[in-house]
Image (tube, helix red, strand yellow):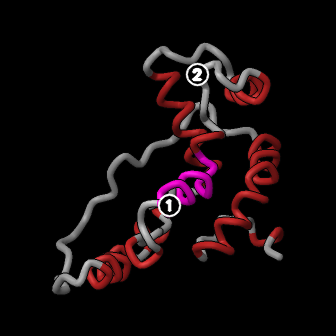
Amino acid sequence: MLRNPVDRAYSDYQQARRKGREPLTFEEAIEAEKTQALAGRQYLRRSIYIHHLLRWSKYFGGEQMLVLKSEDFFERTQGLMERVLDFLDLPNWKLEALENRNKGKYEPEMDPATRQRLEEYFDPHNQKLYKQWGINFQVAAAVH
């Protein structure tokens, strides 16, 4: 299950801040990651899903991997759960009411200009992801 890569990167950063492991602002941290590849920061790198999935696909065939968007799960939980159960060849069952867990608001919220830059940064990787697995994280205006 994959989360929008921009949101995943920012969430990872926020968690590092809360735990006292990240002294930089988000913008400083992502710039440091780009210029100091092995500096320990991997907010962006971990969000380039195509690399991870291609590595996994060396060991598991496409029929053994079900790749889903977490946003779809939270919007259509029962439908996606049915898809997972079908993929696993398990009997279907109705989920009990689920509460939305771990939903929070980040302080500060991500700067819109930073979000735009990251959407552009991830776009070529997300296009490969879409082509290979049909997962679309592209912004509507950027869809080709």
Q: Is residue 101 left or right of residue 30?
A: left
> Is residue 85 covered in magenta?
no
Distance of mark 1 from mark 2, alpha carbons? 26 Å
Tell whether label 2 touches label 1 (CB within 8 Å).
no
Which comes sooner in the sequence, label 1 or label 2? 2
Q: Is residue 128 left or right of residue 50?
A: right
> Is residue 51 covered in magenta?
yes
Q: Identify the residue position indicated by label 1 in the image.
A: 58
What segment is highlighted magenta in the picture? 47-58
Q: Residue at x 53, y 59 (%)?
A: 53
Q: Indicate the position of residue 82 as horizontal and vertical percent values.
A: 30, 82
Q: Amino acid at mark 2?
A: Gly
6 to 22, vertically: above or below = below
Q: Identify the residue position indicated by label 2 in the image.
A: 40
Which sits in the foreground, 124 or 19? 124
Task: Please tell me in which quadrant of the rendered image residue 129 appears.
Answer: bottom right
Determine which of the numbered discs, if any, sits on residue 119 in the image: none
Q: Is residue 24 left or right of residue 55?
A: right
Q: Indicate the position of residue 14 as horizontal and vertical percent values.
A: 53, 31
Q: Residue at x 60, y 39 (%)?
A: 10
Quadrant holding the N terminus = bottom left
